Image (cartoon, rainbow, N blue to C red):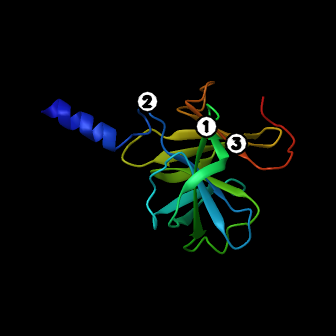
Amino acid sequence: MRLVCALVLAALCPIPGAAQAPAFYVVDLRHAGSATLHSANRSISAGTELPYVLPDSSRMACCFRVGPVGTGSDLLFDGEDRPLFAFPGDLVGKSAGKAERGGLGFGLAGMTAVKGKGADTWELSMGQGARSVIVRQCTGSEGVHFRLYRGKADRKPFADYYFALGYDTEPSCR
């Protein structure tokens, strides 16, 4: 019976330290008056409020409130080049007016804090005693790569996401 309960809990509550990657998302702030959440999680409920990291300031902002309809994303892809999911919504809370339009924010389901760890590197603290996650960002020729690591010294990410910007950028990825 304990084994059955443990398996049910594991299926319902993925833990960032486990084999499955935590649900990653990008908040697109590039369009005045609106924001869009692009997520690896297709089942985010309308009204859910998610914090996000503002990379330029290495601070966590609160919050993106998910709108009513999710569709396929043509901007966020996983490491296997599969498109993920997009949700319209808006920014709420104290940080809403301070969020700089024109950029991107990012986050992980269950994150509780962020610390800058050098150029384009952040450590996200995760709730419920889970291991923190290191996020490294670099640019490709037309978008941004987000790579997730279990530790700062890791060379190989456990998850990789690509956000297409729709215009050319100067590549910084190795």
Q: Which residue is mark 1?
A: 82
Q: In the rendered structure, which amino acid carries the disc numbered 1?
A: Arg
Residue furthest to the top in view is: 155
Q: Spatial distance from mark 3 to mark 1, Cα to Cα?
A: 30 Å
Q: Amino acid at mark 3?
A: Gly
Q: CA distance from mark 2 to mark 3?
A: 26 Å
Q: What SS does tag 1 mark?
A: loop
Residue that label 3 marks = 118
* Residue located 85% across and 44% down the image: 169
Q: Is residue 163 above or below residue 90?
A: above
Name above or below for residue 145 compared with residue 39: above
Instruction: State the residue at coordinates (60%, 32%).
Output: 152
| First in residue order: circle 2 vs circle 1 | 2
Residue 146 is left or right of residue 113, and the answer is right
Name the residue located 66 percent from the left edge and 75 percent from the top edge. Answer: 97
Q: How many marks?
A: 3
Amino acid carrying label 2: it is Ala
